[in-house]
Amino acid sequence: MSSIPTSFFGWVYFLLQEYGGILFKGACVTLLLAIVGTIIGCIIGLAVGIVQTIPEDSNKSTFSRLLLKCEKWILYAYVEVFRGTPMIVQAMVLYYGAMSVFQIDMSPMFAGFFVVSINTGAYMAETVRGGIDSIDKGQKEAAVAVGMNHFQMMRLVLLPQAFRNILPQIGNNLIINIKDTSVLNVISVTELYFASKSAAGVYYRYFEVFFLTCVIYFIMTFTASRLLRWWEGKMDGPSDYELIEYDPMQDPCGHFPINPKAK
Amino acid sequence: MTVDNTAPLISVRGLTKSFGERQILNGIDLDVKQGDVVSVIGASGSGKSTFIRCVNFLEEPSGGEIIYRGKPVLEAFKELPLYRTKVGMVFQQFNLFNNMTVLENCTVGQINVLGINKDEATKTAMKYLEHVGMAGYVNAKPHQLSGGQKQRVAIARALALNPEVLLMDEPTSALDPEMVGEVLDVVTNLAKEGLTMVIVTHEMAFARDVSSRVMFLDKGLVEEEGSAEQIFNNPTSQRTKDFLSRFNLMK
Ligand SMILES: Nc1ncnc2c1ncn2[C@@H]1O[C@H](COP(=O)(O)OP(=O)(O)OP(=O)(O)O)[C@@H](O)[C@H]1O
Ligand SMILES: [Mg+2]
């Protein structure tokens, strides 16, 4: 082992050599949790958001209308409960609750994926609903007028547009998840914060280790943010189009000629 | 489906529509025969848009009937979407699908609703895009087009489904004056080719010159209906006279 350093940066360098591997592993776990949780959360959010925007069609039978109402109410409760309680508490309740009530000993990692996904899902559900609701009413009317049913309208017209609108919000969620998975250390998920705490404890160099941790978190969130920006730009497509020929009907002279009726 | 080819394409019988307590349409009758070009005119708020939206069930009528070739629509078609492909709609605000190119706008209904294959759909779409002078813009997105161009694409989109009637709700009202002409030219050509249309419009000269029949709506009722000649040159109702006198229709 090398000699004990004396300066701040000396310590940082020393700890990086000593615990770089552990911190790197922790960062990978953090990223994995954040990315998988965000993706599954988005899928949950999409599903919930779509159900919540199904119109209550008066043509349908009373039973299917009641069923839809029930579904909407349950989903609404889900969104409110998971948005309204801290993730750190949810993690505790789920992990220890499953163990003591159902005798299920899930791995901390599984509990972690579960909590992050279900939490992101609750936030995304609201975002998706808002994304769909904010699309111009004319788009829906045009879809109906060309004969699309509700499902086709969603798939072909509304969701693609809503997706573009909520992409920044997905990015936000990813960044929040990269940071907030740190709370999962309470159920011993070996993510970056947990790894840092273990490393810092050995030499009692909390400041130096967490300085490193801070830099690693920032590198991860900043990279995620840049990548998402790039993706957004790519989705918008080229800003000009290929014009094949000129428009023969555009008439700079304007107005419909008011001729005497010639019939 | 049995169709009666001698019956009017679309008959509206005693159509009423209320929004909550307010009754907007108070019993409207209209026969649209093959080849008719019916202009619907009337003051703002008289119910023109509500009327035309009821015809393709974009608004659910409160009472009365819409009859397609002699049979009530709800009996003639298992599903409303099928009926809607027979009755094209062109909106005041164009409403092109913003996430699609010009070409996709004109093929999406054919492919997904009518089940036509992509090549066939593209061919049909190109035919109508050429017809409205927009064939050069197939790869453009709606936000890259002028209002007049958008509306011409919207017309091509409706025609691509091969409808039997085209409904238009003030197709030129959202356009800058210099673009009104290009859209009205397209509509005029369609009328000459014998396409059946129902057009809500404030362009009186256009209504007079292009339509075969004119319906004047007032407070949710048909105040007067007849040939363009009759309505514009010899209106019988005082209300019609007052309304038309506001437009400068000098020859
Ligand atoms: N969804 C709705 N809910 C409540 N009232 C409505 C609704 N749609 C239309 N109305 C009312 O119905 C009346 C007729 O509206 P409509 O749009 O049919 O008139 P219009 O003849 O098309 O007028 P304009 O020439 O201004 O387009 C108006 O008083 C309007 O406020
Ligand atoms: Mg209107």
Image (cartoon, coloured by chain):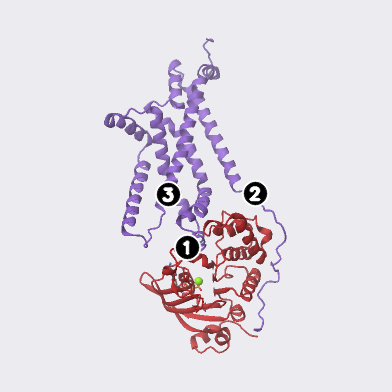
Chain colours: A purple, B red
Find disc 2 in the rendering and name its residue. Answer: A238
> Which residue is situated farthest in the right direction here?
A245
Mark 2 is on which residue type?
A: Pro
Q: Where is residue A77 in the image (x, y as percent from the top left)?
A: 33, 46
Instruction: Read off the chain for label 2.
Output: A
Residue A180: percent from the left, percent from the top? 44, 34
User: What residue appears at the point 38 percent right and 42 percent down from the top-left corner?
Assistant: A83
Spatial CA span between label 2 and label 1: 34 Å
Q: Residues within 10 Å of mark 3 (few under 14, many from 20)?
A: many
Amino acid beneath label 1: Pro
Q: How many labels does the image show?
A: 3
The mark that comes first in sequence, 2 or 3, is: 3
Residue wearing tag 1 = B81
| Location of residue B16 (image quadrant) | bottom left
Is residue A114 shown above or below A258?
above
Label 3 vs label 1, nearer the camera = 1
Is residue B102 in view from this perspective?
no
Bin the neighbour count of mark 2 within 10 Å (Cα to Cα): few under 14, some 14-19, many 20 and up: few
Image disc number at residue A127:
none
- From what the image shows, is residue A182 above or below residue B168? above
What residue is at 48 percent from the left and 64 percent from the top?
B82
Determine whether the residue tagged by mark 1 lies in a helix, strand or loop.
helix
Pointer 3 residue:
A49
Relative image position of residue B114 (x, y in whole percent): 53, 60
Q: What's the residue type where badge 3 is placed?
A: Gly
Q: Alpha-carbon distance for marks 2 and 3? A: 30 Å
Residue at mark 2: C-beta within 8 A of ligand 2: no
- Among all residues in the image, which is located at the extreme left? A101
Instruction: Tell me the mark number nearer the camera, choosing from 2 and 1.
Output: 1
- Distance from Cα at disc 3 to Cα at disc 1: 24 Å
